[in-house]
Amino acid sequence: MDSVIDFCRTTMVAGMAVGQLALAFTCILGGLLVRKMLGSVLLRSLLSLTKRTRTSLDDLLVEAIRRPVETGVLLAALALAISVLRLPTEPINIRGFAHNALVLAIAIVAAWLLFRLIDALAQYFGSIAMTTESRLDDALVPLFRKAMKIFVGVVAFVVVVQNLGYSVSGIVAGLGIGGLAIALAAKDTLANIFGSVTILIDRPFRVGDWIRTSEFEGTVEDIGFRSTRVRTFPRTVVVVPNNMLVNTIVDNQQEMPLRRILVTIGVTYDTRAPQMRQLIAEIEGILAATEGIAPDGQRVRFHDFGGSSLDLKIRCFTYALGYDDHSAVRQQLLLTVMEKLEELGLEIAFPSQTVYFGKDEVLPLHRVEPADDSGRPAIPPRGGAPTGDVPQQTEQR
């Protein structure tokens, strides 16, 4: 036994005793075993217990900490193995490099753990916010999640810098020299942050609303610190700075209780007044019978004598606010009106004009009398048209 101990102490490999290497290997192997036991036994048992509770918060928290804790166990075993090895400091400071690497890794794992806990809390409180009538909490939950992640990131950076031997107070003092430049550069960023606060307080829209401005139209996907993301109908994403968004006119289409259908139908001029009255009555019946059209606000009126048609204006509202459902109701209405026009024997007019050809004279408005024996008209045409010239009339559509 003494010979084995002496061999482990005296035999060197790469400047380190065999006993140190064996002990370091044992630490790493023990860390792997603890990680396996922690993941397969303890955390799974804890997760099975949390599933029996009424709240889902404990399930989210256990699931959030599982992977970071397993990684943290490995880092702890690696740190213990490095301390056992007593790495050299000359000619290259391997011990200092390993120490700094461990500090950075531990800070990353700790920040990762906090990020996952923040996401779990945001998911839980976000589900609660969806059940409330207030729209403010729906937007505040993702905003606070981003703020907490930024705070954790800054704290992790300060801890890493401090443990690496740098003076944090010196860094802060150095930033004070360029404070004015930073303030000027951050002017737009601060304006956008205040814009996001204005959006949350004033609540002109929320995530999921369909909005329209003079430059774009789409569905709000995210309201951030700096900008708001809107998904347009061509499926592109418009990123709008919040400062610009609060200073423009926003039409929130989601707030309308009903969506309007406004159609103008032009029938030909050979349509008689009784036919027009019958058509109006039939379309009113179609509006009342079409599924998805609200009974309030229905209007069918003979609107105008158009340039080439008798214009009939139809106005109604649909319960469907989405574009696809609204278009389906509109299509059904128009098809039914077309069938009714065919049934009544009426035609939809299209732009047309009648052109008369003459020779720079006013055309006669009455029938030209037959010519006498001399070949001249018995009665001169009204308007002074030359005798013997009969104007031609063609109709062009």
Image: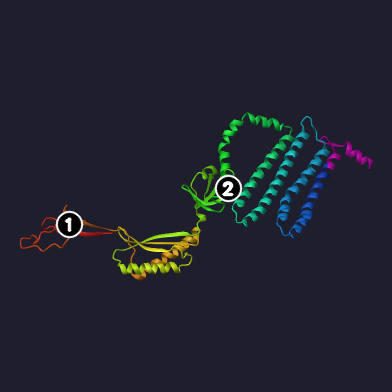
**Residue mark closest to the camera, 2 vs 1:** 2
**Is 214 situated above or below 308?**
above
Identify which residue, 233 or 53, lies in the foreground: 53
| Coordinates of residue 245 in the picture (x, y in percent) | 52, 45
Residue pointed to by mark 2: 201
Query: Residue sitting at 68 percent across and 51 percent down?
Result: 121
Query: Residue sitting at 48 percent across and 47 percent down?
Result: 249
User: Which badge, 2 or 1, comes first in the chain's sequence?
Assistant: 2
Is residue 20 within the magenta segment? Answer: yes
- For the record, the magenta segment spans 1-23
Query: Residue sitting at 82 percent across and 47 percent down?
Result: 30
For the question of whether residue 30 can be seen, the reply is: yes
| Coordinates of residue 358 in the picture (x, y in percent) | 17, 55
Q: Is residue 228 left or right of residue 121?
A: left
Q: Main secondary structure of the magenta part?
A: helix
Name the element at disc 1.
Answer: loop
Identify which residue, 325 or 243, lies in the foreground: 243
Quadrant of the rendered structure where residue 263 is?
Answer: bottom left
Tell which residue pokes out farthest to the left in this image.
373
Residue pointed to by mark 1: 363
